[in-house]
Image: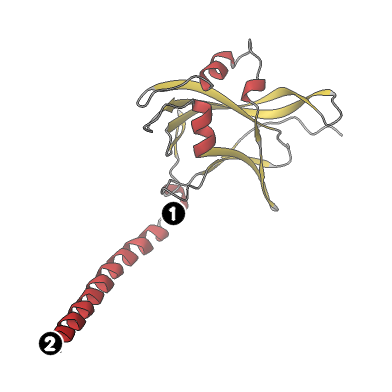
Amino acid sequence: MQLKRTLFAGGLLSMLLLAACNGDSTEEAGTEEETPAEETTGEETSEDGLSYSGVNGDYSFTNFTPVEVPATDAEGNDMTIQAVAAEFEYTNTSERTSTPSEAFSLDLAIRQVSEDGEAPTENYTMDLEDEGEFAEGKAASAELVEPGESATAVVAYGPLDPELATHLQARENPIEETESMDHEIELELAPAEE
C-alpha cells in the first residue's frame, strides 16, 4: 500500500512539473506568434540581396533575371518559354557533398502564386545557353561542393505566367525544423502571347 502511495505521489508530482514547464513554453510560443511575420520568415533582405539558411546550405541571392529558355511544345515544335534565373552564393552547410542546384531544389522552390493556390515550376537550368550571360553560374550549379565550401551558381525555373506573382519559397521539411520563407520576386515579364 505504501508503494502505491509513493508511486501515485511521484506521478502527481511529475504531472505538476510537466504542467509548469509546459506553461512556460506556451507563454514563449505566444510571444513568438505576436512577432511580426517579416521578422520570423527566416529570410534576410539587405541592399546586397536576400539570404536564407536551409538544411542543405546557406543561400545569398544577388539577382533574379527574367530569361527566355528554348523548349518544345506538345506537338514537337520549337518555342521559348519565360523563366527566372536566380543567381546566388551557395555555402554547403550539410555533412555531404552536393551541387548547388540539388541543394536549392531540396531547400527552396520557385512557384507562381494566385488566388487559386500555388503553381509549381520546373528546373530549366541546363536549358540556359552554354555561352550566355549565365554560362559560369550554370556550370557551377552542376559541380559538387564539399561541406564548408562555397560556390556562385545560377538556377532557372519556369515556365512563368506573366499574370501570376512569382515567389521564392522555403520547402517544408517534416523531419527537421526549418526556417520559413515566402519572398515575392519582382520580375518584368513579357505579356503572354495569344
Res 110 quadrant in image: top right
Judged from this view, the residue extending furthest toward the bottom is 1
Q: Alpha-carbon distance for marks 1 and 2?
A: 54 Å
Left or right: residue 154 versus residue 161 is left
> Disc 1 residue type?
Pro
Q: Earlier in the sequence, mark 1 or mark 2?
A: 2
Residue 6 image offset from top left, x and y in percent: 15, 82
- The image's mark for residue 77 is none
Could you say whether the residue bearing mark 1 is in a helix, strand or loop? loop
Name the residue rendered at 51%, 22% in the picture.
153
Q: Residue 102 versus residue 84: which sits nearer the camera? A: 102
Name the residue rendered at 57%, 26% in the picture.
155
* Residue named by callout 2: 2
Res 166 quadrant in image: top right
Could you say whether the residue bearing mark 2 is in a helix, strand or loop? helix
Name the residue rendered at 46%, 52% in the picture.
37
Res 34 quadrant in image: bottom left
Q: How is the image coloured?
A: secondary structure
Q: Residue 117 versus residue 18: which sits nearer the camera? A: 18
Q: Answer few, some or many: residues within 10 Å of disc 1's Cα (few below 14, many 20 plus, some between 14 and 19).
A: few
Residue 73 image offset from top left, x and y in percent: 82, 29
Q: Answer few, some or many: residues within 10 Å of disc 2's Cα (few below 14, many 20 plus, some between 14 and 19).
A: few
Q: Nearer the viewer, mark 1 or mark 2?
A: 2
Name the residue rendered at 45%, 30% in the picture.
60
Depicted 20 relative to depicted 111: above or below: below
- The image's mark for residue 36 is 1
Residue 174 image offset from top left, x and y in percent: 47, 51
> Disc 2 residue type?
Gln
Judged from this view, the residue extending furthest toward the left is 2
The quarter of the rendered structure image containing the C terminus is top right
